[in-house]
Image (spheres, rainbow, N blue to C red):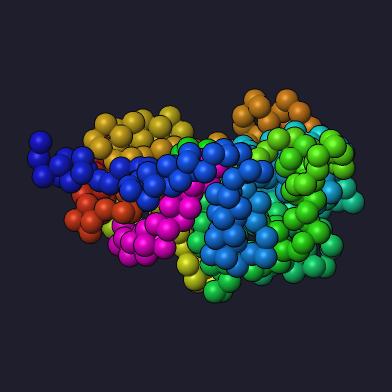
Amino acid sequence: MNDQAQLLADLPVWPQYGDEERAGLLRALEQGQWWRMGGSEVDSFEREFADRHGAPYALAVTNGTHALELALQVLGVREGSEVIVPAFTFISSSQAAQRLGAVAVPVDVDPETYCLDPEAVAAAITPRTSAVMPVHMAGHFADMDALGKLSADTGIPLLQDAAHAHGAEWLGRKAGELGSVAAFSFQNGKLMTAGEGGLVTFPDEASYREGFLRHSCGRPRTDRTYRHQTSGSNFRMNEFSAAVLRAQLGRLDEQIATREQRSPLLASLLAGIPGVVPQGRDERVTAHPHYMQMFRVPGIGEAARNALVDRLVERGVPAFVAFRAIYRSEGFWEYAAPAATVEELAERCPVTEAINTDCIWLHHRTLLGSEEQMHAVAEVVAEEVARA
């Protein structure tokens, strides 16, 4: 194995864990109550996460998709509503709305940040629009100034899909300080993980209380007579997941600091490769957790892009193809799809169409490596792009 291959083989693994997670699991086990109504780990995690993200209230749930679905219900999204989502996102963003019977309306994204385009949002609003869902792609905040103004002017609430944005800041403000609901994910690849899990932050007590009812089958915390006050489902997080996530939260700031050091270096190295264009960064993003290191190879085409990713993986670079445009997945069309064809949506979303075929992302564990490893990653990318 040569030096380059060894550097890549030694990239940090994910998930990361240690004695803190072990102690948390034992603590949850020995308290004798393993669900949130009898234990203390979920309650403690919610307080700690809310404090870290500037939110008055937080509610831990089973996964990030359920976090979005629950948040949309609390915001009043119902059958026949419309929810504006990015065309470029993981499909949970749209499916959470569609599972409620709401029509998911895909709109285009910004070519630099890959986040929701506020002008495209404004053009897509109709009298049936019940929510707008900015996705903070790869940990980069969407334009919350423009979207916040649009929300204030129209009265349409925002739901931040912050699945990638643990610890992110917009002009020094965290997701919970922006006045809107935000949903997080703790799936195995996320910046904090318990294998699965999710959380919703709320800006006010009334929405939190409704969220609590709906995440627990409509049942109040102290109910003993099965008085279910709202519809809902069982989205409750268990005590073991919360114990692990408390430890993961303790690791977050140090890991973000490392990634904030490594990402500019790797981005500059990638930008020096002919044909490679890294994701941009809006200067208003004052803390970026870097869920992915994303870059494009414009004009490469989907088949060649996929083959390039395969070669990168073979050489030890943790590379992935970027998300498909949501309207190019069959699952998008099963429930509550818009009255438009794939071709019509593609014509409205030219940036998404391009990203759909030429974008690659590197797992965030890459950015926990050394500077020498950043150079090794970029060297392999350069060699394989030249072959594409």
Give the main secondary structure, helix, strand or loop, of the magenta stretch. helix
16 to the left or right of 49: left
Residue drawn at (82%, 68%), measured in percent from left and top? 153
Residue 60 image position (x, y, % from top left): 62, 48
Q: Is residue 103 visible?
A: no
Q: How many marks?
A: 0
Horizontal and vertical percent position of residue 364: 38, 49
Horizontal and vertical percent for residue 222? 77, 47
Q: Is residue 257 magenta?
A: yes
Is residue 220 visible from the viewing direction of this image? yes
Quarter of the figure with residue 227: top right
Determine the residue positioned at 54% across, 74% down.
Answer: 172
Q: Is residue 26 above or below residue 45?
A: above
- Occupied quadrant, residue 99: top right
**Span shown in magenta:** 238-266
Which one is nearer the viewer's eye here, 37 or 293? 37
Question: Which residue is depicted at the point 25% across and 46% down?
Answer: 11
